[in-house]
Structures are given as structure tokens and as C-alpha cells.
Amino acid sequence: MQIETMVRELWDRENIAKVPRAYSRGVDRRDWALVRACFAEDSYVDGSRASAPIDEYIAGLIPGVEYFPVTMHYMGNQMVDVDGDTGFVESYCVAFHWKSEQAGGEHPENLIVGVRYHDSMVRAGDRWVISRRRVDPDWRSGPYPAT
């Protein structure tokens, strides 16, 4: 394998891995334009609470997230595969949803969930975007859905 090919693969792998992290940052900062920019125009999400085309999915995601004054998604292990102009990344995430006004404060509706994002990726010009996402909710602590 030539050095240029190896560098390109490393570059692609890093840029694919950044997309779920950017998504999490957008959700936690309520930057819905950043969240939307992580997805292809015709992407589809099989979510933990709903499945829909991306714009419909985000429209339903916003009130669910904004129900909580503070959220923090901690991105952990990521497995990335690249095959030309397509790729795949599985990301482990622990998402903290604090109903109390102060993060970490006690409240009966605080929610912590462990999820895995399974993202099929596609190259879009000089960047990567999610073409399809499946969310696997592995565990939770707290009411779900929120009461």
C-alpha cells in the first residue's frame, strides 16, 4: 500500500469519526444547524423513540432534548470502516439529561442512557455525512420516556 493511500485512509477515518462527535456537540449546545449538517439531504434515522427522514427526525428530537435544561453526550469507543466514498462508524455514547437546573443536581426526571450509534457514511465533496443512522439504546437510568 502506498503512503498516499494510507494517509488518505487515516484522513477519512478521522473525518468519519468526527461526525458523531459533532452531532453530540450540536445536541448539547442546541445548535440544530450543526446537528442537521451531520446528515445527508436524504438520510434516514432509526432512532430510539422514532424512525423518520432526517428533517422529521430532528423536528421530533428538538422538544425531547430541550425538555432537559442540560444535556451532555460523552462519546466513547468508535469503530470506523472506510470503503472508497462510503464508510461506517459505530459509536458508544453515554448521554446525560439533567432535568434539574444545575447539571448533576438531584431530580426524579434526570435521565442517563447508554446508546450505540450505527452510522452509514457517505463522502459529500470534501466532508463526510451520515446517510443512515440506527440508534441502539442499550441501558438507561431514570424515566424513559420522560414523564
Image (cartoon, rainbow, N blue to C red):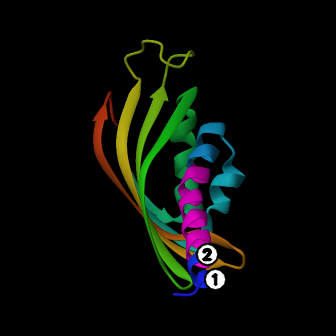
Nearest the eye: 120 or 107: 120
Q: Position of residue 77 (x, y in %)?
A: 40, 51
- Which quarter of the figure has residue 111? top left
In the image: residue 47, left or right of residue 38: left
> Which corner quadrant holds the C terminus?
top left
Q: Is residue 15 magenta?
A: yes
The amino acid beneath tag 1 is Glu
Mark 2 packing: few (<14 Cα in 10 Å), some, or many (20+)?
Answer: few
The amino acid beneath tag 2 is Val
Q: Position of residue 79 (x, y in %)?
A: 40, 62
In the image: residue 83, left or right of residue 92: right
The residue that appears at 47% across and 30% down in the rendered structure is 97
Disc on res. 4: 1
Q: Is residue 138 magenta?
A: no
- Which quarter of the figure has residue 8? bottom right
Nearest the eye: 46 or 95: 95
View extreme (top): residue: 106
The residue that appears at 62% across and 52% down in the rendered structure is 22
In the image: residue 117, left or right of residue 136: right
Q: Position of residue 21 (x, y in %)?
A: 56, 51
- Which quarter of the figure has residue 46? bottom left
The residue that appears at 56% across and 40% down in the rendered structure is 63
Q: Position of residue 20 (x, y in %)?
A: 53, 56
Range shown magenta = 8-23
Disc 1 + disc 2, Cβ < 8 Å: yes
Mark 1 packing: few (<14 Cα in 10 Å), some, or many (20+)?
Answer: few
The residue that appears at 56% across and 27% down in the rendered structure is 70
Residue at the disc numbered 2: 7
View extreme (left): residue: 139
Let me know if residue 59 appears in the view. Answer: no
